[in-house]
Image (tube, rainbow, N blue to C red):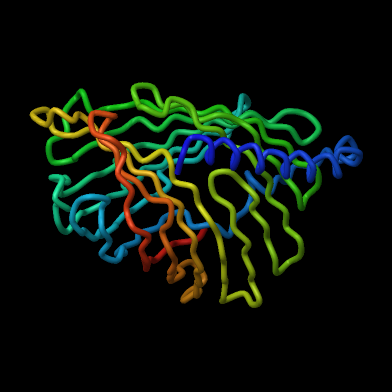
Amino acid sequence: MTTMKRLVGIFARAAVFFVLVSGQSATHAQYAGDYCQLLDRLDEPIWEAYAGAVDSSSIEDFRRTSMLEAGFSAGLFYFRTGIGEFDIRAAVDSIYFTRSGGINLPDHLSAARLDLNYVLRLDDGYALRLGMEPGFYSEIEYAGRDHIFYPFSLHGISAFSPNLSALAGLNFYPGFDRLVDPRLGLRWEISDYLLLDAFYPKSEIVFRPTFDWTARAGVEFREYLEYQLKDRDDRKRIMLDETRIYLGVERLITHQMQLMFQVGRLVDRSIDFRRIEREQDIDNAYFFRIGVGGLL
């Protein structure tokens, strides 16, 4: 995806966001409740494990490759104090290339990190969230101290009503090629059965017809996937861009555990090695993902 297309997409999503929020601004001052859709939902997994695969596809001017994906995340600690809320999680997301694609692709890339969040709740439904994700972002079997990075974020959150909350902020990636990436959007619980997340970089609509079943459809602009390569590789780092369009279904198998399945299409894909070689397009491809998650 070109830089211009990225900018147009961001500004378009920002325009939609502000139009929607402006329609609710008149009622905002009347809401001073404690519940926020973005901070207080209890139906999201406290831990999750997944595995999946991406179909074989060609790299421009080179050969074909396919990918396997796997990951795990879990909440470690959550506590409230008089000065705010602290949430500590651990997460690993890994990519495995089945073939080198003719450009000596690495075998295994991982983002193994802690996810640290501090939330300060203010008056009238406002909150400030500061996050940090220190960890290894690298060809993990060759990871060293030089492969540790400290991405961080600052987000402002506003609850307009018990059913509608919005977020605006920035994610920062010191040492990465993409230094800053915006975060923008809103979450609207339209009814007990329907939830809308209209965000950059990930938007989805969630339908819960019964207590046991959930269906979702979404799109995610993944333009922040960057990993360090082993020290003897002169290319230094690899950057992946893609847009992920998907459908998913989840089935509650106990009161505290759910099964998840997702299928979709990867489009606008590219690969780049820190501008040493020109950006290479990758063919669109189908993918699937299965997982299991635990609820509170």
Q: Residue at x 40, y 43 (%)?
A: 76
State the residue in front, 136 or 57: 57
Lateral position of residue 75 relative to residue 55, left or right: right
In the rendered image, residue 142, in percent from the top left (x then y), is placed at: 12, 36
Q: Is residue 127 above or below residue 112?
A: above
Q: Residue at x 48, y 35 (%)?
A: 3
Q: Is residue 174 above or below residue 259?
A: above
In the rendered image, residue 108, in percent from the top left (x then y), is placed at: 19, 48
Q: Residue at x 50, y 71 (%)?
A: 250
Q: Quadrant of residue 1?
A: top left
Asked whether the viewer can see residue 227, the reply is: no
Lateral position of residue 286 relative to residue 65, left or right: right
Q: Quadrant of residue 235?
A: top left
State the residue in front, 114 or 164: 164
Q: Quadrant of residue 201?
A: top right
Q: Residue at x 50, y 40 (%)?
A: 78
